[in-house]
Amino acid sequence: MPALRRKVNEREPSLAIQGHPTGPTGPLEKRCTVTQADNNSHILSGLTDNILDKDPEETSEWIESFDQLVEAHGTERAQYIMRSLLQRAGAKSVGVPMVTTSDYVNTIPADQEPEYPGDEQLERRYRAIMRWNAAVMVQRAQRPEISVGGHISSFAGLATLYEVGQNHFFRGKDHPGGGDQVFFQGHSSPGNYARAYLEGRLTEEDLDGFRQEKSKEGHALSSYPHPRLMKDFWQFPTVSMGLGPMNAIYQAQFNRYLQNRGIKDTSEQHVWAFLGDGEMDEPESRGLLQLAANDKLDNLTFVVNCNLQRLDGPVRGNGKIVQELEAFFRGAGWHVIKVLWGREWDPLLAKDDSGELVRIMNETLDGDYQTYKAESGAFVREHFFGRSEVTKEMVADMSDEDIWNLRRGGHDYRKVYAAYKAAMDFKGKPTVILAQTIKGYGLGSSFEGRNATHQMKKLTVEDLKQFRDRMRIPVSDEQLEGDLYDIPYYHPGPDSPEIKYMLERRKELGGSLPLRQEPSTKVHLPSDDAYKQAKKGSGKQMAATTMAFVRLLKDLMRDKEFGQRIVPIVPDESRTFGMDAFFPTAKIYNPAGQNYLSVDRDLFLSYKESPQGQLLHPGINEAGATAAFTAAGTSYATHGEPMIPFYVFYSMFGFQRTGDSFWAAADQLARGFIIGATAGRTTLAGEGLQHMDGHSPVLAGTNPAVRHYDPAYGYEIAHIIKHGLWEMYGDHDGDHDFMYYLTVYNEPLPQPAEPEDLDVEGVIKGLYHLKAAEIDGPRAQLFASGVGVPWALEAQEILAKDWSVSADVWSVTSWNELRREAKEAEHYNFLHPNEEPKVPFITERLANVEGPIVATSDMATLLPDQIRQYVPNDWATLGADDFGFSDTRAAARRYFKIDSHSMVVRTLQLLAKRGEVSKDAPAQAIEKYRLLDVNAGTSGVPGGDA
């Protein structure tokens, strides 16, 4: 039985048999019991738990027979026999429970490991040099006059995981298959820079610019993977924990999407994501695993660096994170490979006939495993092997140094290679590799496995000497004993055997990684015909701006040259937005197609799924939808295929819920359109506090890559999207890397045709004059955006009719863009005091405009107030600053005092203050319009999907 536990194990879930008939406490009595520590029982499955063994002698005979099978024919044959027996058991209705965890040993038996194809000694040689240079780079960045931080231990612990991939698996951009996408672990960036230095891509001056991105401009290296800061180097930002796993999944899905739609052959491209075991506690890290399994994304491999530590201490000090992750991933439908022990353990496991070594491996807690590697060989002998007389005797002939040199699997080239190859060969599921490592590996006793190692930035002279000796770097004691912050880098020279070998490996695999490129693929932008309908208005029909947008999107998708590049993304609200019309024509992407009989198959707008579907439908999953947006919006760089995502979502669940993902999308230089449908604090009638969005544009304003617009009419939307497409993919020398965010509403309103004299520049820059007053009288200006424009027009009529006030109406298409441009002008003037001052667009437009300004919107007052300082006129803002609630639109707007009559009263107050109307006018207006009565509101019509 012990041999069965060791060798059959559970290379796949159905193969594990837990518990053994003999053990350190004597023979089995009446019941088989699981031998792992009680407090690990929730992460180790026991097939024989609480099952009565009626004939222990017969059980032993069966196990002995199986042991003989393994010894005679090997583990591969044993796996097949076990699978066959389990399949037969199912057919005979013999209940066998699902096993989610295997013993704490390597998934791939030693006798099934492939031959290592490379020159391991050469590869280990330049890996050592990289580890030295990575640590030295961080050390030099701690000079007292700089002291910008950095992380030494992260790359030290996962260097082998990277290097096996770099030498044998990761395909570069020039590979005939198109190249892989690799999500490198964020804190390990010094290692990527150290490799690029050996490859000749970076210089010593570049390395000395680490984390000094402005003061060393031209030779600066970003702290972590940041494509926006290093556009020719990094592809994927990963240091916001949890987003990397999620984005990697959707990158793999998007690769298949391109393949299935016939846009690009991505069949040889693979997505690799290097993650930390502590990072796997982030909800985004595990919450989307089912997509990868459901889509059978065997083009995706997660490599979880299980050093058993998070930033402050153990990930699971009292448990076993590897076992937990194994169970979680396997339950989610992933293929799981564990790489826990290096080759030095193979002889010990081979002679573990009693199963005692495996038992101790199973029972040892992660906190103890961490402690062992922070101590010594003698400590491990006593506290690990000394837990059983059998295992103590097993290592009796080994020295303490031999015991200390028993490596973890993630530091063994052969073990890691075997796992990577198995992942690439496995079809039908995504793979996760759980690689056990030591944080700070090779850095010496001050760093290895220490709780504080993540925050440790400096090595002492003694640390450096030990590290130098272990890495065999030709640096003298004198060089180390001088300036502690001027420790030399080491490069053996471009003609050295190790560098020539390293470069040849990358050449064969398609070039260096990471590497980001922007191929100059020309995008044929839609012709003016695509925008004609949007500019015509809705005639006698009422149409919400959401519907106006959807109609425009449909016209853009019909464009023969451009339409196929559009990627509509909707998280399960298509019918709310009127996008169900896309189902039968564009179809919903599903790599498996539609293998069921659809309940609405007889309807004109039936639900249609297809491998060639254009619409990405991630379900009720805004985080996943944003990840899909990112993958599509960066396809121009990752694939050389510009794709334009239109991500349409329930407005409240955009920037509030996934703001971090939009920030990462900006870092990744994503381009595309973000459509916050059903926007507004009062417009989404009846939905209530959790749904009524009046602040997302304020949040969006904090993202420098987001251009927000709050259009009132379909023709405004047409010009904004046309300009956005030109800015992203037009032929100009300016910045292309923007995301356009439009808030649109579900309130049906008349959509006017585009005025003949429309101020298009004003629409794009954020403000244009919509309607002039038709009477003479005291002057006022009414500003409104989005659904608030009709309130301003109504207020204009009331002011003229009831108070003889001459008010003009302005449509503010973007409060944020008005502020952005004004701030730029202000900053320019600050730095150029001797030049002609720049005048902000808003200030220039209002230079000859008379009267106070009253601004309103269905958003918080913070939004319009952004431009207040740039407006020369008297100013008042109306806004919806409280939580939303369920009610009619008219009542809600009256409650917030943002409606037409509130605009009238506020205008009268400003004019009264100036002496241009009676001082009693405001109070009279409040009484006349029953401003304090929410039931007296008239601004708003019912209707519109929610």
Image: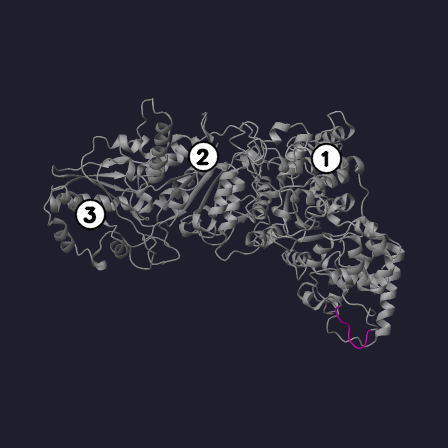
Q: Is residue 33 magenta?
A: yes
Q: Main secondary structure of the magenta part?
A: loop
Q: What amino acid is found at the position of numbered circle 1 in the picture?
A: Ile
| Viewer-side residue, 404 vs 847 | 404
Quadrant where the image shows the N terminus: bottom right
Horizontal and vertical percent position of residue 99: 70, 63
Mark 2: few/some/many CA within 10 Å (<14, 14-19, 20+): some
Q: Nearer the viewer, mark 3 or mark 1?
A: 1
Q: Is residue 745 left or right of residue 124?
A: left
Q: Nearer the viewer, mark 3 or mark 2?
A: 3
| Viewer-side residue, 524 vs 16 | 16
* Mark 1, residue position: 129
Can the viewer see residue 757?
A: no
Quadrant where the image shows the C terminus: bottom left
Which residues are drawn in magenta?
28-34
Mark pair 1, 2: CA separation? 54 Å
Q: Is residue 39 left or right of residue 844?
A: right
Sequence-wise first label, 3 or 1? 1
Residue at 22% over, 53% down: 938
Sequence-wise first label, 1 or 2? 1
